[in-house]
Image (cartoon, grey):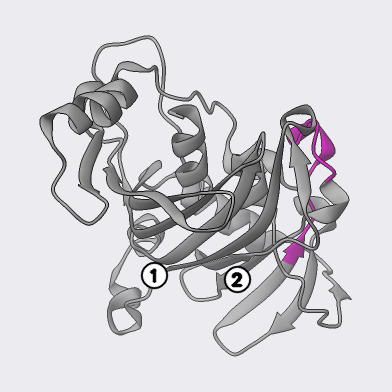
C-alpha cells in the first residue's frame, strides 16, 4: 500500500491544468521505461522516534535487488556507528531471510494514462498530472493522491517524478497512517550526452530523494531514500520476484521487510 502512495502521490502545486489532446508522449515514455533496467537500488535511512519526538534508533542500509537474496540488504550504520555482529544478525540477516516483495504489474497499470492532463509545456519537456487507478490502490483513498510526471521530448523518457500528500492518509485498515510524503526523482540528468543514448539507456540513471513519515500503533518512523540507481533484478533461484520497475520500489522493499 505504501508503495502505491509513493508511486502515486504528487503535484499539489495548484498549477492550472490543461487537458492533453493525446497522451502519446506519455505512453512512449512508459514503454521506454519498461524496456530498461527494471528495478531500483537505493540507500535507506530510518529514524525511529520516541513518544516525545526524541530519537530512539537510526539505521542506514543499502538495498540492491540485483544481488542474491542473502545479500540484497546491507546494514551500514546503527546510530552513526558500524553495526555489531548482533545488529547485523538482528536487522540485516532477518531482512534477507524474508521473501522479496512481488510486483507483477507494469508501471503504467497503476495510472490512468488515458485521462492524463498537461500542466506545463516547456521547450525540452512536458509535465503531466496523472490520476491513480482506484483498482491499483486498494484500501487507499486515491482522491488524496495524484501523480506528476515530466517527459523529455527528445528521448521520450521519464525525466522527473515528484510526489506529495494533500492530507494524512490511513492505510492497512487504519492501523497505520502516513502523515507526510515527499518524492523528487530525476532521470536522464546527463543532458550533454542524452542524445547519444538509447531511450532505455537515457532512463537508466536516477537522482533525488524520497521521504515518508508514518505512524503505526502509535509508533512513529521516518524513512528517507537516496542514491537511487536503476538495476536489473537478480534472476537467480527462488520462486518470488523483487519489487521492480517503479519509483515506489524503495517504500515497497522497506515495508516488506519490516
Asked whether residue 233 is drawn in magenta, I would say no
Find residue 241 and report its image quarter.
top left
- Residue 210 falls left or right of residue 88: right
Describe the element under mark 1 as helix, strand or loop.
loop
> In the image, is residue 18 above or below residue 214?
below
| Residue appearing at x 46%, y 29% in the figure | 258
**Labelled disc at residue 156:** none
Asked whether residue 130 is drawn in magenta, I would say yes
**Labelled disc at residue 188:** 1
- Residue 51 falls left or right of residue 65: right
Q: Residue furthest bottom?
A: 123
> For the magenta stretch, what is the residue range?
129-141
Find residue 148 and report its image quarter.
bottom right
Ranked by sequence position, the earlier of labels 1 and 2 is 2
Crowding near the residue tagged with mark 1, few <14, some 14–19, many ≥20 C-alpha atoms within 10 Å: many
Q: Position of residue 145 (x, y in %)?
A: 78, 54
Q: Position of residue 181 (x, y in %)?
A: 63, 59
- Visible in this render: residue 35? yes
The mark total stands at 2
Q: Quadrant of the N terminus?
A: top right
| Residue appearing at x 48%, y 58% in the figure | 54
> In the image, is residue 219 above or below residue 28?
above
| 166 vs 66, nearest the viewer | 166
The residue under label 2 is: 150
> In the image, is residue 157 above or below residue 30?
below
The Cα–Cα distance between marks 1 and 2, rounded to whole angstroms, is 11 Å
Q: Position of residue 23 (x, y in %)?
A: 74, 61
Amino acid at each position: 500500500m505504501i508503495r502505491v502512495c509513493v508511486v502515486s502521490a504528487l503535484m499539489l502545486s495548484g498549477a492550472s491544468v490543461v487537458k492533453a489532446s493525446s497522451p502519446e508522449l506519455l505512453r512512449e515514455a512508459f514503454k521506454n521505461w519498461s524496456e530498461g533496467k527494471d528495478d531500483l537500488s537505493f540507500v535507506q535511512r530510518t529514524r525511529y522516534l520516541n513518544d516525545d519526538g526524541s530519537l530512539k534508533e537510526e539505521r542506514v542500509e543499502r538495498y540492491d535487488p540485483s544481488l542474491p537474496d542473502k545479500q540484497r540488504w546491507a546494514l551500514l550504520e546503527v546510530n552513526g556507528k558500524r553495526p555489531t555482529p548482533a545488529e547485523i544478525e538482528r536487522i540485516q540477516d532477518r531482512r534477507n531471510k524474508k521473501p522479496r516483495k512481488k510486483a507483477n504489474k507494469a508501471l503504467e497499470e497503476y495510472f490512468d494514462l488515458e485521462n492524463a492532463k498537461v500542466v506545463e509545456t516547456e521547450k525540452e519537456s512536458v509535465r503531466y498530472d496523472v490520476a491513480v487507478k482506484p483498482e491499483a490502490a486498494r484500501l487507499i483513498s486515491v482522491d488524496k493522491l495524484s501523480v506528476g510526471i515530466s517527459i523529455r521530448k527528445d528521448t521520450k523518457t521519464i525525466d522527473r517524478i515528484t510526489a506529495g500528500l494533500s492530507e494524512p492518509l490511513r492505510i492497512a485498515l487504519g492501523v497505520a497512517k502516513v502523515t507526510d510524503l515527499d518524492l523528487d526523482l530525476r532521470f536522464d540528468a546527463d543532458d550533454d550526452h542524452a542524445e547519444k543514448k538509447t531511450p532505455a539507456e537515457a532512463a537508466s540513471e536516477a537522482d533525488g530523494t524520497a521521504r515518508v513519515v508514518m505512524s503505526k500503533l502509535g509508533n512513529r518512523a521516518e524513512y528517507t531514500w537516496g542514491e537511487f540507481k536503476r538495476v536489473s533484478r537478480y534472476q537467480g533461484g527462488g520462486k518470488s520476484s523483487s519489487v521492480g520497475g517503479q519509483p515506489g520500489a524503495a517504500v515497497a522493499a522497506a515495508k516488506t521487510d519490516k
